[in-house]
């Protein structure tokens, strides 16, 4: 089977990529996961935006190592990182044992809402992965999320996605990011601050996070060294 018709757009900058994206477009990076799904017509985008032409730069700016989004891990391991940042390079090689990932989108009725990442220790193993097995796993995950609901309690298809527990919890990582930037702390410390403040004020973490995201509570209000 061949893919359904689609428009192909190759871009060479992030600005061009953003301009080319539409609601029913898909981004083509490595293509190891997307192309098989296209061939089986499990996804039918009207436009494919190829970002492989965007330079994946590795550079140092103001003492900060910046790694572009299109940099492959293999290229990173062979780059100047090994010479200029040997400790980071050693950690990269030793603490990230996976050398390949297959990211497969969820199938209907959850298509477009997320992906399942399957990690492989060796990149050469990709050729031995049976797409039929991958799709069976994706179908099972989708079926569990969409139909069974959380904790196996059937509440109707997709009901849990718009329930208060899910929408409230979605604010937590956003609030953590705001605290990380606003207070110059790590993500671990940001979560600890959220929990500590919620406990001290007898609130739920999700509700506190929502107030931070909506700026009803400023991030500086959670500083440990504030005087008020």
Image (cartoon, rainbow, N blue to C red):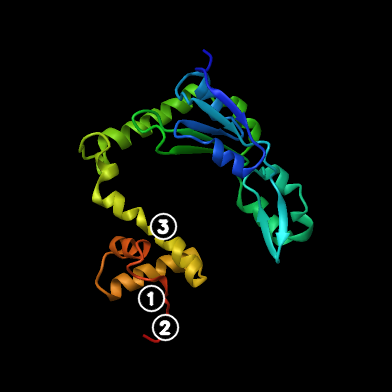
Instruction: Tell me how far mark 2 sits from mark 1, CA to CA.
Output: 8 Å
Image position of 7 (left or right of 214): right
Give residue 182's position: percent from left, percent from top: 48, 69
Where is residue 65? Give x, y as percent. 68, 59
* Measured Cα–Cα span from mark 3 to mark 2: 23 Å
Seen at 46% across and 61% down, the residue is 177
Q: Residue at x 29, y 72 (%)?
A: 199
Q: Quadrant of the C terminus?
A: bottom left
Q: What residue is shown with label 2?
A: 226
Picture layout, residue 176 above or below residue 45: below
CB under 8 Å between callouts 2 and 1? yes
Label 3–label 1 contact, CB within 8 A: no
- Badge 3 or badge 1: first in the primary sequence: 3
Q: Nearer the viewer, residue 89 or 112?
A: 112
Tell me the SS state at disc 2: loop
* Disc 1, SS: helix
Q: Which mark is residue 221?
A: 1
């Amino acid at each position: 089977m061949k893919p359904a018709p689609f428009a192909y757009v190759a871009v060479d900058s992030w600005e061009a990529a953003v301009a080319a994206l539409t609601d029913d477009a898909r981004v083509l990076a490595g293509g190891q996961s997307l192309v098989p799904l296209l061939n089986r017509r499990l996804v039918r985008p009207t436009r494919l935006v190829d970002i492989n032409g965007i330079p994946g730069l590795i550079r140092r700016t103001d003492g900060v190592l910046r790694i572009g989004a299109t940099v492959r891990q293999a290229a990173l391991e062979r780059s100047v990182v090994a010479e200029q940042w040997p400790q980071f390079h050693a950690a990269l090689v030793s603490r990230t044992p996976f050398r390949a990932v297959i990211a497969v989108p969820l199938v209907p009725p959850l298509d477009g809402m997320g992906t399942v990442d399957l990690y492989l220790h060796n990149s050469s193993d990709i050729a031995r992965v049976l797409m039929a097995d991958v799709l069976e796993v994706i179908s099972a995950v989708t079926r569990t999320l969409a139909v069974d609901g959380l904790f196996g309690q059937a509440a109707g298809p997709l009901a849990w996605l718009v329930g208060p527990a899910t929408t409230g919890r979605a604010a937590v990582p956003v609030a953590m990011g705001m605290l990380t930037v606003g207070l110059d702390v790590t993500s671990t410390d940001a979560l600890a601050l959220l929990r500590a403040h919620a406990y001290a004020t007898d609130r739920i973490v999700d509700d506190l996070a929502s107030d931070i995201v909506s700026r009803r509570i400023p991030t500086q209000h959670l500083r440990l060294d504030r005087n008020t």
